Image (cartoon, helix red, strand yellow):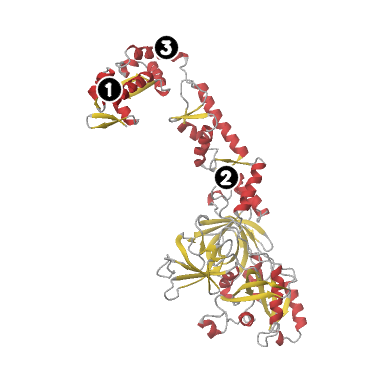
Amino acid sequence: MTVRHFIVGTAGHIDHGKSSLVKALTGVDPDRLPEEKARGMTIDLGFAHLQIQDPDDPDMLYDIGIVDVPGHADFVKNMVAGVGSIDLALFICAADDGWMPQSEEHLQILSYLGVEHALMAMTKSDLADDLEFTVEMVRDDISGSAFDGIEIVPTSSIKRTGIDELKAALARKLRDVPDPIDIGKPRLPVDRVFSPHGIGTVVTGTLIGGEFLKGAPAVVQPRGLETHLRNIQSHSADQEKALPGMRTALNLTDMPIATRERRDGIHRGDVVTLPGLGEPCDTLDVLLEKGDRDVRGQPSATIPIKNGQKVRWHHGGANYGARVLFLGTKLLERGQKVIAQLRFDEPVYAFAGDRFVLRDWGKRSTIAGGIVLDADAKRRIFRQVRQKEFLENRAAAPDDVATYAATLLERDKAVPHTGFLAKSRFSKQAIDASLQELTEADIATIQGKLIVDQVWWKRMFEKASSLIRDHHEAHPEHIGLLINNLRPKLTSSLPDPKLFDPLLEALCQNGFVRAGKSVRWGEHSPKLPDNLAAAGDRIRAALKANPLEPPNPKELAPTDTDTKALKFLLETGEAIQLSDKAIILAEVFESAKSRIVDYIRTNGASTASDLRQAVDTTRRIMIPLLEKLDSEGTTRRDGEIRVLR
């Protein structure tokens, strides 16, 4: 038998019979709190489990987790926490009451969250004077909305009529609902936290984006708390793994529950995910939308949102305060969409492509919805031209992986291959395919650990090459251009100064050579300019005249011209400075080194005096010569003797 897993969330006005209908469908009363029992209304989220066999396909079973949400206006924040990950909305509308304010607000919330599939149960149908007329009135109320034309099934939880018809309608509707996607990035937005005696901390939520395996490491965002998945359950049954679309309970190791006294624990609104899926951020760039439908009794829902206004951001089970800044406008009017930046007082965790809801600061009304365009936004670049183009292109195709890849590359020019678009709602396979397309189109290329904009990278490479070659022409005596002088000439053209090192590495892989603190074209051979040539010849002659007892540096270079020529010989490696009092030719150094190695191999451990006599030089030369051999790893000093390494 094929089993498909889905989450169905209720929606509707208070006292329209949502919880009663869930109990009639499943046999489970979703109202679990004593206060809910006492007041006769749903306050927090409730959960139930339902399995329906497809009436036309006995081999198809729909395993449904039902999230029952409160309908009272005071508890809309709890409603939003419950419907952020549902596959299908089950609207509840009482036949004796019709379409009410929370019916409309819930409809708008579901629209903002991108819920596409829904049907309606017309509860208390036995109380309607004219059921057909009531149904038509409700159809008029939802006309023009995202759920215009949905199926409406009359039911009565008291008389248990229409329940089987509703189950059949659910099955028919779920046939056309896509399976929850697996992008290899599991996230469990936490909607409930508790600690059964002897068990430890347990969190529940609807798993999205990937699988969780029992025993696997996990992290709780946005605070980056490390943990392990000690156990997994779904509808009270132990599981080795949880799949996307499952109501999931996780038993977490070493994870306290947050309280007023202890804030470092886990609470509703946190997200359990895997390590390596990005870090939280205190700024999001988003596309905001304000609907044009009225909610009776909520005038603040129709008032334009002002630039700089404080709002409440609802995402998954999270509820954070933020300030909203617009790009290119000062107001968000009804029926408009606008690019905006949300600035939080503390980090939040969201993916590019995630949808969310905004409510007013006083928590009275739902005022807008939106989609995250940049989950790692930076405040200082929000109004820059490159960021404006980046956001406008993403806003035009907010669900297209190719657009997200191309815009990131176009804006940043070079990005790490590891973690590319990790904080997005796209799978690795989809991301890799988009990169392949960019590479084949000569838009992107791989440089080591980076993905780079090919045209820009070529331009930067050519600029660096020209700077080095120009330096060779101006200063042929230099071994190359000092890296510390090249860096500031390039970093002003780099979106990130850290890109200088990968660019230098690319130069050295394509014809250039790093020589100490300098970089040079591989075919460049330093030579003394005409005005220094004579001084260079004099110094060479002086060093060759008495190779192992040469003049000291001051005698070699008494003038500024001589000093420049001597510096050239040292930089090019033609001469070697043993100490501030001793300089010898490189060929002399190699000859002396060979004689010292041969002597120690033949005679064993040797003193400096033994080696001085073998090489036939003075102590002024021998001691710094041996120290250099020690430092380069040829010999090792052991007390008063030298041995080979």
For the N terminus, which image quadrant? bottom right
User: Residue 252, percent across and down?
Assistant: 46, 67
| Residue at image mark 2 | 412
Q: What is the secondary structure assignment of the residue under circle 2?
A: helix
| Residue at image mark 1 | 622
Image quadrant where residue 24 sits:
bottom right
The answer to whether residue 433 is left or right of residue 645 is right
User: Residue 100, percent across and down?
Assistant: 67, 77
Disc number lying in front (1 or 3): 1
The mark tally for this picture is: 3
User: Residue 442, percent across and down?
Assistant: 65, 40
The kind of residue on which mark 2 rests is Asp
Residue at 29% over, 28% down: 627
Task: Sort mark 3 into few (<14), some (14-19) or many (20+) by Cα contacts within 10 Å.
Answer: some
Residue at 35% over, 15% down: 543
Task: Sort mark 1 into few (<14), some (14-19) or many (20+) by Cα contacts within 10 Å.
Answer: many
| Residue at image mark 3 | 534
Image quadrant where residue 399 sits:
bottom right
